[in-house]
Image: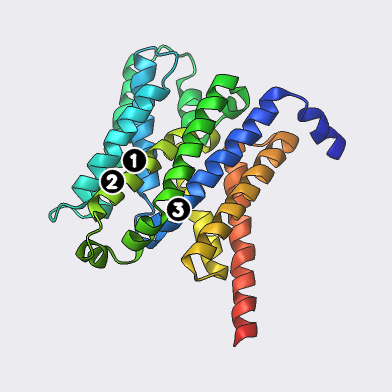
């Protein structure tokens, strides 16, 4: 198996897949802790459906490079979700459900009406659940992903204290002069960027797993925000790496394999947390 893996690693597309997968997993885990603690976990799911609708529009327009359009539409969706969720008449969870389901239905309708593909069901399935597109990345796409990933990590590190403050006590942050709305908007926009990057990795229906599972796994073991964030990042990167490797060796779907790896890690962390709690008692 080691020899087989070594043989695969000689191919550039395998190395590209591992690089992109690790970068996306790292970015997803950093904001995952904040989104889980703010009870806004499903923003990833909602934005992934918006991105699906944008990809449908790009397919109808026959765009060879759909990332700019998808990124713009998804960021707009993030802003809309945030603004709508703050509306007293439409709460956050209802806003996410409304926009995400609407975008998903709109995208699928467009793909049916204007589709020129002979395998519509296959195209939809690969978009929703991920496909082999992660193994067909070009050097330019890897570079774009690397630049955006570095930007996401840099934003998180620079604004770490503000994100921490807004996460745990938004009202107190506002009272001390922190522009909580601006930082919430920043988190939403960065999340939108991560969603677009992750579309090729796990598909639009499984993206939430990259955001939620590493954070929840780390919370089983640690209680400190910084420790949870670091642990979440490590778990996410390790699970993404092994998920991609297992997928390549076993010939299983990349996205599903990564998510199952995250689920296994969550189970192990839950067990470790239980044992740790028992020993401390």
Label 1 crowd (10 A; few <14 / some 14-19 / many >=20): many
Q: Is residue 216 above or below residue 196?
A: below
Query: Dots 1 and 2: beta carbons under 8 Å?
Result: yes
How far apart, in angstroms, are the residues tagged by discs 2 and 3?
15 Å
Q: Is residue 86 above or below residue 171?
A: above
Where is the C terminus found, in terms of image quarters?
Answer: bottom right
- Disc 2 on helix, strand or loop? helix
**Residue 153 position within the rendered picture, expressed as x and y whole percent measured from the top left:** 48, 44
Q: Say which residue label 3 marks.
A: 32
**Residue 143 position within the rendered picture, expressed as x and y whole percent measured from the top left:** 55, 26
**Residue 230 position within the rendered picture, expressed as x and y whole percent measured from the top left:** 55, 58
- Taking 108 as reference, is 262 left or right? right
**Residue 151 position within the rendered picture, expressed as x and y whole percent measured from the top left:** 45, 38
Where is the N terminus found, in terms of image quarters?
Answer: top right
Labelled disc at residue 185: 2
- Disc 1 on helix, strand or loop? helix
Query: Can residue 201 be seen from the camera position used here?
Result: yes
At 80% from the left and 35% from the top, the residue drawn is 5
Chain-order first, disc 1 or disc 3: 3
At 57% from the left and 27% from the top, the residue drawn is 142
């Amino acid at each position: 198996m080691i020899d087989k893996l070594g043989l695969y690693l000689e191919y550039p597309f395998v190395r590209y897949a591992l690089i992109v997968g690790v970068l996306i997993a790292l970015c997803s885990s950093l904001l995952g802790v904040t989104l889980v603690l703010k009870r806004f976990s499903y923003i990833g799911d909602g934005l992934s459906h918006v991105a699906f609708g944008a990809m449908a529009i790009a397919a109808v327009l026959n765009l060879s490079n759909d990332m700019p359009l998808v990124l713009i539409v998804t960021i707009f969706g993030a802003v809309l979700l945030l603004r709508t969720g703050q509306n007293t008449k439409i709460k956050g969870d209802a806003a996410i459900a409304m926009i995400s389901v609407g975008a998903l239905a709109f995208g699928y309708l467009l793909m049916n009406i204007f589709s020129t593909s002979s395998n519509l069901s296959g195209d939809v399935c690969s978009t929703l659940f991920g496909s082999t597109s992660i193994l067909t990345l070009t050097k330019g796409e890897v570079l774009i992903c690397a630049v955006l990933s570095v930007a996401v990590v840099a934003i998180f590190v620079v604004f770490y204290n503000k994100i921490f403050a807004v996460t745990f006590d938004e009202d107190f942050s506002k009272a001390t002069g922190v522009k909580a709305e601006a930082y919430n908007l920043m988190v939403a926009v960065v999340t939108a960027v991560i969603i677009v990057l992750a579309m090729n990795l796990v598909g639009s229906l499984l993206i939430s797993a990259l955001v939620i599972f590493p954070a929840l796994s780390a919370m089983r073991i640690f209680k400190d925000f910084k420790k949870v964030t670091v642990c979440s990042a490590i778990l996410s990167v390790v699970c993404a790496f092994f998920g991609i490797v297992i997928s390549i060796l076993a010939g299983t779907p990349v996205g599903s394999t990564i998510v199952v790896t995250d689920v296994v890690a969550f189970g192990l962390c839950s067990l470790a947390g239980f044992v740790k709690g028992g020993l401390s008692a």
